[in-house]
Image (cartoon, grey):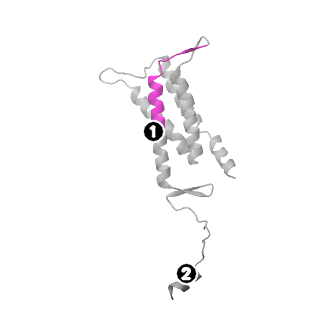
Amino acid sequence: MSRASVERELPVRAEPVETAPAGGEHSMGGRVRPAALLAATGVALLVLGAVLGVLGAFLNDVVPRVLGIGLPVGPILAAVGNLTAGLLGTLGTGSRLGGALPGLGWFAVVAVLGSLRAEGDLIVPGDGRGVTFIVVGALAAGLALLPGAEKVRRRRLR
């Protein structure tokens, strides 16, 4: 078979073929996402949670007065940050694991900063403000894992 006859038999433009995703890939909305992209997203979500934990822990003692009311920055950052990062992680990855990763990163950092070191350093104390920061952050991370976020993603894709 000559090269000219092979070129005549081949279509000029190939149509895309719908295939099932391979074992290391996840399908979302007709697109195929490689496992490497999901792994990088997972690491980014863990790091985001860790950054939120560090910022919240160091800003836990900051209480600015707004209209005469003291608003603690740490618990507010923990609530808004963990809830938002968890919901976006769930929506972006399409799984609850993606929503849990920021909370896991946050909790790992807060657990380390809340434990007493040999030198006597303690960032998140066991007083009312520190416990409030930990409880509010954990609740917000847990709220992001409720089934509603996944259902919104499925409904939007249909």
Inspect the image, locate mark 2, and give the three-letter code of the amino acid beneath it: Glu
Q: Residue at x 61, y 39 (%)?
A: 146
- Mark 1 lies on a secondary structure that is helix
- Mark 2 lies on a secondary structure that is helix
Does residue 48 belong to the magenta stretch?
yes
The correct choice, above or below, for 40 with respect to 108 in the image is below
Q: Quadrant of residue 14?
A: bottom right
Residue at mark 2 to residue at mark 1: CA–CA distance: 51 Å
The correct choice, above or below, for 123 with respect to 34 in the image is above
Q: Which mark is residue 7?
A: 2
**Which residue is farthest top?**
68
The correct choice, above or below, for 158 with respect to 13 in the image is above
Residue 41 in picture, x, y percent from top left: 49, 46
Q: Quadrant of residue 147?
A: top right
Q: Which mark is residue 120?
A: none
Residue 148 placement, left or right of 118 = right
Secondary structure, magenta segment, majority class: helix
Magenta-drawn segment: 46-66
Q: Residue at x 58, y 82 (%)?
A: 8
The correct choice, above or below, for 54 with respect to 47 in the image is above
**Which residue is farthest bottom?**
1
Q: What residue sits right under mark 1 in the picture?
A: 47
Residue 78 in picture, x, y percent from top left: 52, 28
Inspect the image, locate mark 1, and give the three-letter code of the amino acid beneath it: Val
Q: Residue at x 49, y 58 (%)?
A: 24
| Dot 1 crowding, Cα within 10 Å, few <14, some 14–19, many 20+ | some
Does residue 34 belong to the magenta stretch?
no
Q: Residue at x 58, y 64 (%)?
A: 20
